[in-house]
Amino acid sequence: MKKFLKINLFAFLTIILSFNYVVCYATPIPDVKLTVDSPTAFELPKYFRKSTDKITPSENINLSGLDKLNISGSGQFSKTGVP
């Protein structure tokens, strides 16, 4: 009976303590800034596009305000890859 109690107590404490560590490390650290740099390239990525590119008008898509939106999309690029 003592062995059964020890095993259950050990399992219970392991589960409780593991939840404590998950809660402690789940909060974000405000001073951490993550940066991912791609390899240095001197050309724009394949399929580079911006919101100011010409789009074929369609009745189903509302494009109002898209020309003022300052975004781009494609693969990742490096600092030297953007003119």
Image (cartoon, rainbow, N blue to C red):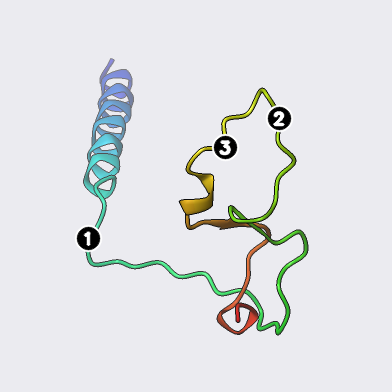
Which residue is denoted by mark 2 in the rendering?
A: 58
Q: Quadrant of the N terminus?
A: top left
Three-letter amino acid code of the residue under disc 1: Pro
Q: Are marks 1 and 2 in contact (CB under 8 Å)?
A: no
Quarter of the figure with residue 16 = top left
Which residue is denoted by mark 3 in the rendering?
A: 63
Structural crowding at the residue carrying mark 1, measured as other residues with C-alpha within 10 Å and reported as few (<14), some (14–19) or many (≥20)? few
Structural crowding at the residue carrying mark 3, measured as other residues with C-alpha within 10 Å and reported as few (<14), some (14–19) or many (≥20)? few
Q: Residue at x 60, y 56 (%)?
A: 52
Q: Which callout, 2 or 3, points at the residue further toward the start of the chain?
A: 2
Mark 1 to mark 3: distance in Å?
Answer: 36 Å
Structural crowding at the residue carrying mark 2, measured as other residues with C-alpha within 10 Å and reported as few (<14), some (14–19) or many (≥20)? few
Q: Which callout, 1 or 2, points at the residue further toward the start of the chain?
A: 1
Image spot of residue 25 (x, y percent)? 27, 49
Mark 1 vs mark 3: give the one in front. 3
Three-letter amino acid code of the residue under disc 2: Ser
Relative to residue 70, is residue 1 depicted above or below? above
Mark 1 to mark 2: distance in Å?
Answer: 43 Å
Image spot of residue 40 (x, y percent)? 66, 83
Q: Residue at x 31, y 31 (%)?
A: 15
Q: Secondary structure at mark 3?
A: loop
Give left or right: position of 5 versus 44. Answer: left
Report the number of discs.
Answer: 3
Which residue is denoted by mark 1 in the rendering?
A: 30
Q: Quadrant of the C terminus?
A: bottom right
Give left or right: position of 46 versus 38. Answer: right
Q: Which of these two is toward me, 22 or 71?
A: 71
